[in-house]
Amino acid sequence: MIIGVTGGIASGKSTVARAFAALGVPWVDADDVAREVVAPDEPALAEIAERFGRQVLQEDGSLNRRALRDIVFAEPSERLWLESVTHPRIRQRIVAHLERLQAEGAPYVLLVSPLLFESGQNEMVDRCLVIDVPEELQFARTAARDDVDDKQARAIVAAQMPRKERLARADDVLDNSGSEQDLAARVTELDRCYREMATNR
Ligand code: ADP
C-alpha cells in the first residue's frame, strides 16, 4: 500500500515523513527522485544538454538548474518538452524505490511529493494524505525556515495549488496547526489505520 503525502510549502511534509519513519514506515521523496534523474551520467541530462546546449550545464557537467528554470519559465512549450523527458523517468524510478522498500518488509510506504496532484503522481498511490495548516502559519513557518520574508512567502503560497482544492482531493487530512507532539499523536493514529488497511487488502 502506498500513501501519497502532500501539502503546501512548510506545511510539514518532511516533519510528518520523519514521524512515520520513527514508527518504521519508510518514504520516497519525489523531489529527490526528480534530482536523481538529471544527475550527471543520466540519459535525461544528456538529452537536456543536447537541446539547450552548454548554457544549462555547470563547469563540472552537472545541471545548472537556474538556467534551465529560466528557459522553461519563459517558454511553456519547452517546459512540456522537459516534462516529457523527465516525468516518465521520475515515475519509473519512484516505482522502483517503492517496490524495493516494500520488498524489504515495510508495512506500507509513503510517497512524499509537494506536487502530488499537479504531477499526476496521485495516480500512483492508494490514498492521499494532505498536511494542512492555515495560511498565516504557513507564511510564518516558511519565513522562519527559509531565507525569505513574509511577502515572498505569501507569493510562493499564492503560486501553489489553493488550499481548498488540495483539501478537496484528500482522502485523509493531517491538521498541523498544533505542536509537534500533536503531530506525532496524529501520525500514530493514522499509522494504526494504515497498518490495518494494509493487512486487510
Ligand atoms: P515541508 O516539508 O512541508 O516544507 P517542514 O516539515 O520542513 O515542511 O516544516 C516546515 C517548518 O515548520 C520546519 O522548520 C519545521 O520544523 C516546522 N514545523 C513543522 N511542523 C511543526 C509544528 N507542528 N510545530 C512547529 N513547527 C513545525
Image (tube, rainbow, N blue to C red):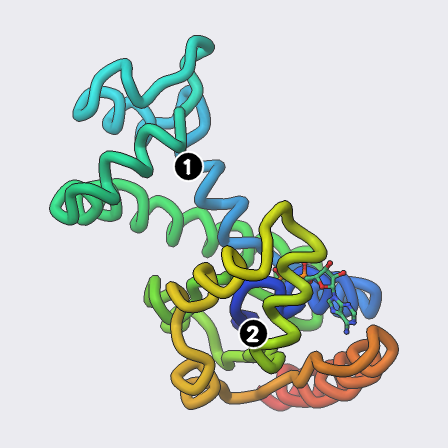
Cβ of disc 2 within 8 Å of ligand 1?
no
Residue drawn at x 16%, y 48% as measured from the top left: 76
In the orientation shown, which residue stands out farthest toward the left? 77
Which residue extends farthest top?
59
Q: Is residue 53 above or below residue 43?
A: above
Residue pointed to by mark 1: 37
Separation of marks 1 and 2 at Cα, in angstroms: 22 Å
| Left or right: 183 in relation to 29 | right
Q: Secondary structure at mark 2?
A: strand
Amino acid type at mark 1: Val
Ligand 1: quadrant of the figure: bottom right
Residue 187 tag number? none
From the image, which quarter does the C terminus lie in?
bottom right
Q: Is residue 72 left or right of residue 17?
A: left
Please tell me which residue lies in front, 139 or 83. Answer: 139
Of the numbered discs 1 and 2, the one sitting upstream in the chain is: 2
Q: Which residue is mark 2?
A: 3
Where is residue 82, by image quadrant?
Answer: top left
Image quadrant of residue 49? Answer: top left
The x and y percentages for residue 143 are 64, 57
